[in-house]
């Protein structure tokens, strides 16, 4: 077939497309459009559920992803954790794989880094040992006693988080589906100690929430089908409320669980995380949204470019006559 | 200091991996192999620190819990895969794991993934006072599910008003599903790129906040 503009368009070197996408993904960081991000029902339902919990409740935040899906899953996990910390909801952190445990540590390091505006100041298990010895374990009493002893919250911090009272790092265990099943009877039977070797049974939050039956929500952030373990072994066995934060690629696979009432809600990809960040800002927890929101302008620009290429490709396909039988084979290099 | 070294290393290898988009090269290969190697090393260290040491080695060495030798031996049998003459022994731990997983997981999986989904499609198409949007949604859901199932029913030729039309509607339903998945896939891939660009521009170069 004779070479013309249409055949040249269909045979465009894909590296040009990579270059365009690269440029489009960099420019909006410097010149943001500020397009609004409107939260959807599936994300609002998770936010509202967490919003109705307090210090007397407890949730699981499970980092069930590895570095491959970090850009999508991490902002979701960070957003839900910051929400829970703001409301003093005790959080059990788990991970379904060794690399996921690294993600858990990375996520907590981000949330508790003083360089982050609105970070949470960690008080380690050892640091508040004397208050435990005095029998002070109730959340508000503990904070009051801690501050009465001259500890001052830094100006850019959103609050204290006491290890063992506000959060426990359970970490990774193999065959995690069976670990979930075991935790429906007893959390301590699966995790006698936390990741740092602290005795879990002595932690006030475990004494108040001994098994998954005493837990009010399991939020799993996952890049694989491992998130469904929480439904299979948690939701179906004991009725544990479950929320998903999944990669965009798998978002459509799990929407069925919302329709069937097995999920409270679902965050899909970076967009889902950005929606949660907007909800946190609207509720007055933080002055500005976090990283996922910043990425949404870039996402919009990249999508527009991809749409443009799809339209252009289709114009070239039909205008060049490639839709006729056999024409494509002759016209493509 | 260590953080700076870490950021520089991550940035250089991010660029090395993206250099594949131009063409395959040794730097990309190096990055690819390092990911596999370091991940495996990290996996082994975490498994030892988090599982083997506190749950096997310490209890045996410090508390005399010798019964743990039984699961340890079962675990060690996996290694017989490397010795063809006794490789059959590795089937014992596998059989144990498979049996346990099937026994524990099958009833719950059936309930979670099959029965609940069946239940969710058994809907009233219309009842008094139901908003019209819900009626339309329920009709689409029930007919769409039936049509997609007809498409995968191969015991009858896809001809006639029921099987013919049903399978045609079914293929449309499936294609719409694929389209939604494709859209989300594009979004996901771009999100991963955004994550790396944020890292390069913010953490490495510090030119954005």
Image (cartoon, rainbow, N blue to C red):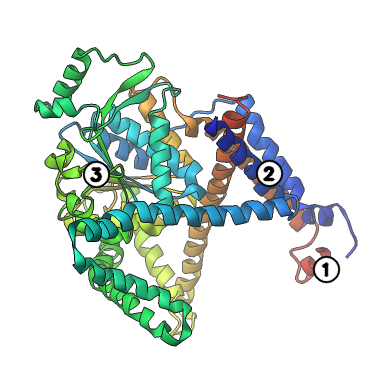
Q: Is residue A233 visible?
A: no
Residue A119 horizontal side relative to residue B39, left or right: left
Quadrant housing the C terminus of chain B: top right
Front residue (pair A224, A130) = A130
> Residue A195's quadrant in the figure?
top left
Residue occupying the far right of the picture? A2
Dot 1: element:
helix
Residue A10 horizontal side relative to residue A128, left or right: right
Q: Mark 3 belongs to which subunit?
A: A
Residue at the spot 37% in from the left edge and 56% down from the top edge: B48
Q: Which residue is mark 3?
A: A217
Q: Mark 1 belongs to which subunit?
A: A
Residue at the spot 72% in from the left edge and 54% down from the top edge: B26
Q: Mark 2 and mark 3 in contact (Cβ < 8 Å)? A: no
Q: Which residue is mark 1?
A: A330
**Callouts 3 and 2 on one subunit:** yes
**Callouts 1 and 3 on one subunit:** yes
Q: Mark 2 and mark 1 in contact (Cβ < 8 Å)? A: no
Residue A201 higher or lower than B127, as above or below = above
Mark 3 vs 2, N-terminal side: 3
Task: Give residue A180's position: percent from left, percent from top.
Answer: 25, 56
Instruction: Using the image, tell me which numbered label, if any, was put on residue A308.
Output: 2
Mark 2, Cα crowd under 10 Å, few <14 / some 14-19 / many 20+, is few
Q: Mark 2 belongs to which subunit?
A: A
């Amino acid at each position: 077939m004779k070479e013309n503009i249409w055949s040249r368009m269909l045979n465009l070197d894909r590296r040009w497309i990579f270059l365009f996408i690269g440029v489009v993904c960099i420019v909006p960081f410097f010149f943001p459009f500020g397009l609004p991000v409107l939260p959807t029902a599936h994300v609002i339902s998770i936010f509202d559920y967490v919003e109705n919990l307090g210090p007397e409740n407890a949730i699981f935040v499970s980092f069930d992803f590895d570095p491959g899906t970090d850009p999508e899953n991490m902002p979701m996990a960070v957003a839900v954790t910051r929400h829970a910390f703001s409301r003093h909801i005790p959080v059990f952190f788990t991970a379904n794989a060794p690399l996921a445990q690294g993600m858990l540590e990375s996520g907590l390091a981000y949330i508790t880094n003083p360089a982050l505006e609105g970070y949470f100041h960690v008080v380690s298990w050892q640091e508040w040992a004397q208050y435990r010895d005095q029998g002070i374990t109730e959340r508000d009493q503990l904070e009051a006693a801690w501050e009465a002893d001259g500890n001052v919250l830094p100006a850019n911090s959103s609050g204290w988080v006491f290890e063992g009272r506000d959060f426990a790092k359970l970490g990774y265990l193999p065959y995690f589906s069976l670990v979930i099943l075991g935790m429906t009877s007893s959390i301590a039977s699966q995790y006698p100690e936390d990741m740092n070797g602290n005795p879990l049974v002595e932690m006030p939050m475990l004494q108040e929430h001994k098994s998954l039956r005493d837990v009010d929500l399991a939020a799993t952030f996952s890049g694989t089908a491992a998130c469904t373990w929480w439904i299979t072994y948690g939701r179906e066995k004991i009725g544990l409320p479950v929320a998903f934060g999944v990669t965009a690629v798998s978002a459509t696979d799990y929407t069925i669980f919302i329709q069937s009432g097995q999920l409270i809600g679902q965050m899909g990809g970076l967009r889902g995380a950005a929606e949660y960040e907007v909800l946190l800002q609207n509720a007055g927890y933080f002055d500005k949204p976090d990283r996922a929101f910043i990425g949404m302008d870039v996402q919009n620009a990249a999508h527009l470019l991809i749409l443009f290429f799809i339209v252009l490709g289709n114009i070239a396909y039909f205008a060049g006559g490639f839709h006729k039988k056999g024409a494509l084979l002759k016209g493509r290099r | 200091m260590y953080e700076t070294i870490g950021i520089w290393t991550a940035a250089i290898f991010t660029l090395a991996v993206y250099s594949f988009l131009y063409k395959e090269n040794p730097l990309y290969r190096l990055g690819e192999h390092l990911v596999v190697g370091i991940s495996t090393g990290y996996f082994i260290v975490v498994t030892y620190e988090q599982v083997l040491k506190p749950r096997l080695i310490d209890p045996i060495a410090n508390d005399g819990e010798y019964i743990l030798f039984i699961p340890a031996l079962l675990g060690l049998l996996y290694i017989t895969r490397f010795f063809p003459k006794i490789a059959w022994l590795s089937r014992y731990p596998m059989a144990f794991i498979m049996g346990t997983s099937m026994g524990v997981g099958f009833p719950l999986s059936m309930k979670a993934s099959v029965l609940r989904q069946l239940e969710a499609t058994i809907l009233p198409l219309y009842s008094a006072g139901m908003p019209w949007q819900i009626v339309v949604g329920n009709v689409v859901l029930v007919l769409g599910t039936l049509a997609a199932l007809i498409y995968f029913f191969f015991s009858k030729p896809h001809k006639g008003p029921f099987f013919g039309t049903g399978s045609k509607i079914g293929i449309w339903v499936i294609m719409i599903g694929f389209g939604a998945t494709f859209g989300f896939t594009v979004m996901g891939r771009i999100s991963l790129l955004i994550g790396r660009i944020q890292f390069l521009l913010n953490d490495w170069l510090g030119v954005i906040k």
